[in-house]
Amino acid sequence: MQVLRRSLLAVVPILAIPGLARAVGDASTAERSLGSADAPVTATEFYSLTCPHCAAFVRETFPRVKSELIDTGKLRLVFWDFPLDQLALTAVMVARSLPAARYEAFTAALLASQDRWAFARGVNSTEELAKMAALAGLPREAFNQAIADTALKNWILERQQFAQKNYGIDSTPSFVFNGPGAKNHRESGSLGYDAFARAVAAAAG
């Protein structure tokens, strides 16, 4: 499996992307983000739930990013699903079927437990995802509907293709920062906090 890394790119409104709009008001395709809409810098993150580098970023860097940049109003972080394989696609379809407020916590839990549901030998990954989804408040019937949602699957894959074509995303995590001092500035890899903070500062101008 090619390992792509987790990423942040220029914010493109979902309904502004040709061919990617679903029914207006569809909660599953609404933006998933953290931080104030008035933050001077916006970073859109492209990531995969089966990417070890993405897990490392969340584990080692994200806590400080949230406390020192997002919670202080300096950064808005937008999540862009970029699944590297079928399992990651299934997992993010489940994540998007939860209420938006639970998306970040659920995806963080999946990244933290990849060894249990994604990479463990002899486990049924779908069943492990169902158990975790149930703990997050998604009953089995809703879980089954989520993983069978062809429209949602196609929407995620079309956005992934859009990101590859228009932003050159070929690895996760990759980060693109936008602000007064930068337009579509991209960084790739599991950035440490200092490197991440420098990119935010540069984008702020």
Image: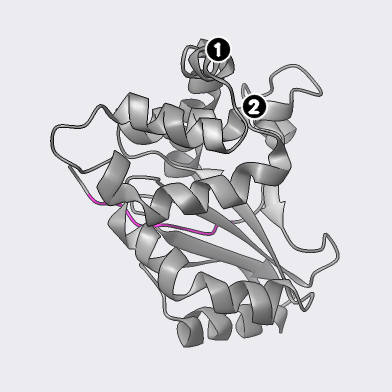
Tally the marks: 2
Residue 81 drawn at (x, y percent): 50, 41
In this view, which residue lies farthest toward the right?
38
Magenta stretch containing residue 197, yes or no?
no
Q: Quadrant of the C terminus?
A: bottom right
Most foreground residue, 58 or 105: 105
Can residue 31 be seen in the rendering of this structure? Answer: no
Give neighbour class at mark 2: few <14, some 14-19, many 20+ (Cα, 10 Å): few
Q: Residue at x 51, y 33 (%)?
A: 133
Q: Are marks 2 and 1 in contact (CB under 8 Å)?
A: no
Tag 2 secondary structure: loop
The boundaries of the magenta stretch are 3-9
Magenta stretch containing residue 6, yes or no?
yes
Residue 152 drawn at (x, y percent): 56, 20
Residue type beneath disc 1: Glu
- Depicted 80 relative to depicted 132: above or below: below
Residue 26 drawn at (x, y percent): 74, 22
Tell me which corner region of the image, top left, top right, bottom left or bottom right, holds residue 16.
top right
The residue wearing badge 2 is 18
The residue wearing badge 1 is 141
Please tell me whether the stretch drawn in magenta is mainly helix, strand or loop.
Answer: loop
Tag 1 secondary structure: helix
Q: Residue at x 52, y 20 (%)?
A: 143
